[in-house]
Image (cartoon, rainbow, N blue to C red):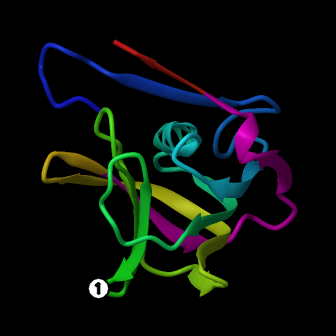
Amino acid sequence: MSSTPERLVFATAIALLGLSGQTLADTFQRVSGTVTYDNYPALEAFLLEAIELDVGLNISFVANSTDTHGTVSADDSNAQFAAYRHGGQDHARIVVKDGYVLKNGSYVLDGFYHVADGGLNAGIPTILLNVTQPPEGATIDNVDIGSLQYEISD
């Protein structure tokens, strides 16, 4: 997201198979795959569209504590997981306090999460993911992270 008042960046995400987050029919999208520098913006936009909704995730981030341009940092510190895309325009930071594990060199988020607006930290938006459970009998639409579409417009 750009912090300059002259530029308004609007991000939206639509999975090819359905709506983001939950619908009135209690249908949830469960996004699966490995998060990379290239697909991080689509995941970010999907989650921004799902603020105050519940989503399913089965995603992994390669553990990386560096802040190098062109990478996604993914690290566990201060009893929480945080991921951020370095390079180009500012991107939202994804933060999870519970509901993640470090497995074979990657942080794995596998479950259902309530998506919340975490405000700004040093001018960077934060997306908070809090563990939740889908309602009994909810329909789950599995979506590969590569099929998420996003658009950033000025």
Magenta segment includes 138: yes
- Identify which residue is drawn at 82% across, 32% down: 17
User: In the rendering, at what x and y percent does residue 154 appear?
Assistant: 33, 12
Give the residue drawn at x 64%, y 45%: 21
Q: Residue at x 24, y 52 (%)?
A: 119
Point out the stretch of residues depicted in magenta.
Answer: 126-149
Return the residue at label 1: 78
Q: Looking at the image, can residue 95 be seen?
A: no
Magenta run includes residue 90: no
Disc 1 residue type? Asn
Please state the horizontal and vertical placement of residue 109, each as a whole percent of the image: 62, 71
Position of residue 53 relative to residue 130, above or below, is above
Please tell me which residue is depicted at 37% across the width and 72% down the height of the picture: 65
Question: In the image shown, does 51 or 65 lie closer to the viewer?
Answer: 65
- In this orientation, which residue lies closer to the viewer: 2 or 66? 66
Q: Quarter holding the N terminus?
A: top left
| Pick the front one: 29 or 103 | 103
Q: Is residue 44 above or below residue 128?
A: above
Query: Does 141 sit left or right of 96 as displayed?
Result: right
- Is the residue marked by circle 1 packed among few (<14), some (14-19), or many (20+) residues within 10 Å? few
Q: How many marks?
A: 1
Q: Toward which corner of the image does residue 90 lie, by quadrant? A: top left
Name above or below for residue 90 compared with residue 30.
above
**SS majority, magenta:** strand
SS at mark 1 in the image: loop
How far across and down, in percent of the image, does residue 33 sit? Answer: 73, 56
